[in-house]
Image: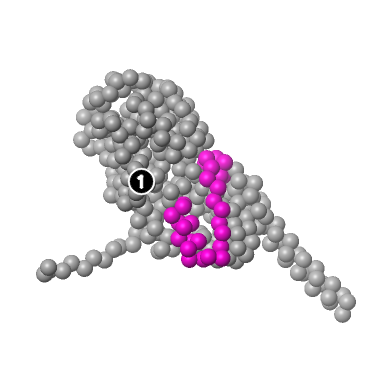
Amino acid sequence: MKNKGYLIFILIMTTFLWEGCHRGKNGSGSMLTGEAVIAADEALKPLMEAQLDIFHSIYVASSINCKYLPEDSVISLMMKEEIRLAIVGRPFNEEEITFLKSRELFPESIPMAYDAIALIVPAGSSPIALTTDQIKQILSGNITDWSQIANSGKSGNIHLIFDTESSGIVRYLNEKLELKNKLSGNFTFAGTNEKVIDMVAGNEGYLGFIGYNWLSETESIKVQEKLNRVHLVGVSNPTNEMAADSAFMPSVSSIYNNKYPFIRKVYALYTDPAASLARGFLALLTSERGQRIIYRNGLRSEHDFQRLIRIKEDF
């Protein structure tokens, strides 16, 4: 009997230690209760806040703390096993997958939405349209003055504003425009997307780069206030200067139709082997409810849900 009791004790302790080891700092509880820590690219903060507000309103016994950091820092937390769920603008790469599997984790890259990289200028500026080639030349330091861009209606130095050097926005632009990780010209890292908006709004000649979800929910009073301070820049794919007629600003329609050149897929990166609160939140993100939240925020969801509208013939 003593041996049997001892074996049961060892089994319970082994199970407890295994779950503690795999959950670490990620929280405790079930898929719908307890506490959890996750992380997201700061450029995606408005989208994540909308999802978290809904989750917490439904599951009142849950508390999820989302850290908003540059993309590289978010991925670093995943590699250190300090978090199990991250929301960023890229999937796991092969090196990361190999490393996580060596730790007996099972990395998943789950597409959940489509955001865009938006270009902004001060609200007092004339409407501006740029081609992707012009943007590449600006980021490469070959175009440094607004007067070098025909029909810009501006002159003076072009001052570029980004969130951080290690952000998903900078990485995306490097990959999309093949900049070879070499930003040139006159640029500043503001620290956050909100600070990018603030700096651009108050400085003529500034050109900022932000996650479009900061401006996509156009029915929001906060977004309307931002759109009174900055204007979106139209972007077109062709390289000739007459391409302004075919330029598109980021919008739910230009993202759905793939007309806007700088669209990026948003991924939920997940490694938790347990039925944790982080998995419960992931279930919301990929559910019909979570996907509708993405749509209501002016972005494209990974899964399209048709809206059925009944049209009356008599009024």
Residue 112 position within the rendered picture, expressed as x and y whole percent measured from the top left: 43, 54
Residue at 34% over, 26% down:
204
Is residue 204 visible to us here? yes
The picture quadrant where one finds residue 195 is top left
Residue at 39% over, 44% down:
214
- The residue type indicated by label 1 comes to Val
Residue 294 vertical position relative to residue 14 in the rendered view, above or below: above
In this view, the residue farthest toward the left is 314
Q: Looking at the figure, which quarter contains the C terminus?
A: bottom left
- The residue identified by callout 1 is 223
Residue 50 vertical position relative to residue 119 in the rendered view, above or below: below
Residue 95 position within the rendered picture, expressed as x and y whole percent measured from the top left: 58, 44
Residue 64 vertical position relative to residue 243 in the rendered view, above or below: below
- 247 or 124, nearer to the observer: 124
Start-end of magenta stretch: 48-75
Q: Secondary structure at mark 1?
A: helix
Number of marks in the image? 1
- For residue 123, side relative to residue 73 (left or right): left
| Residue 63 painted magenta | yes
Is residue 116 visible to us here? no
